Each structure stands twice: as C-alpha cells, then as structure tokens.
Amino acid sequence: MAALPEAVAKAEAQAAGLPSFTTEELFNGATEIGIAHQGLTYRLRITRQGKLVLNK
C-alpha cells in the first residue's frame, strides 16, 4: 500500500523539524477554519478544487 501524499508531506516536514498537521487533523471534516494571529482572525478554507485559500 502506497503512502498518502499528506502522510509523505507530513513526514518530510517533521524530518525538517517543523510542526506538521494534515488538513484532516486541522479541519476535522469542516471546509473552513479560523486562525487567530496577533489579534486578528484569518480564515483558511478548502476550495472545491482541493486548494487552500487564506483570507484576512
């Protein structure tokens, strides 16, 4: 069984010493999440085409 691209990317990021999360872990079934940063909330969403978009 081949590794999923997300698992490979996560393993590569972890090997580089970066905290890493899959979109499944972050979104937990949702298509949009909020990210709080320096007093502002950013919206990260998955598009219908499977791309990630970050908006202020």
Image (cartoon, rainbow, N blue to C red):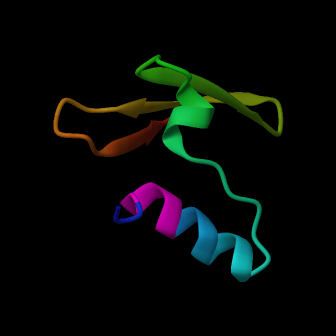
Percent from the top left, x then y, of residue 21? 64, 49
Q: Residue at x 41, y 63 (%)?
A: 3
- Which residue is outermost to the top? 30
Q: Is residue 55 above or below residue 18?
A: above
Q: Nearer the viewer, residue 33 or 23?
A: 23
- When asked about the image quadrant of residue 10, the answer is bottom right
Q: Nearer the viewer, residue 33 or 25?
A: 25
Residue 4 horizontal side relative to residue 13, left or right: left
Q: Is residue 6 magenta?
A: yes
- When asked about the image quadrant of residue 49, the answer is top left
Residue 48 horizontal side relative to residue 26, left or right: left
Residue 13 horizontal side relative to residue 1, left or right: right
**Which quadrant would the N terminus be assigned to in this image?**
bottom left
Q: Nearer the viewer, residue 56 or 23?
A: 23
Q: Residue at x 72, y 30 (%)?
A: 40
The secondary structure that most of the magenta stretch takes on is helix
Can residue 54 be seen from the camera position used here? yes
Can residue 56 be seen from the camera position used here? no
Q: Which residues are magenta?
A: 4-8
- Which residue is outermost to the bottom? 16
Q: Is residue 8 above or below residue 4?
A: below
Q: Residue at x 82, y 30 (%)?
A: 39
Q: Is residue 39 above or below residue 13?
A: above
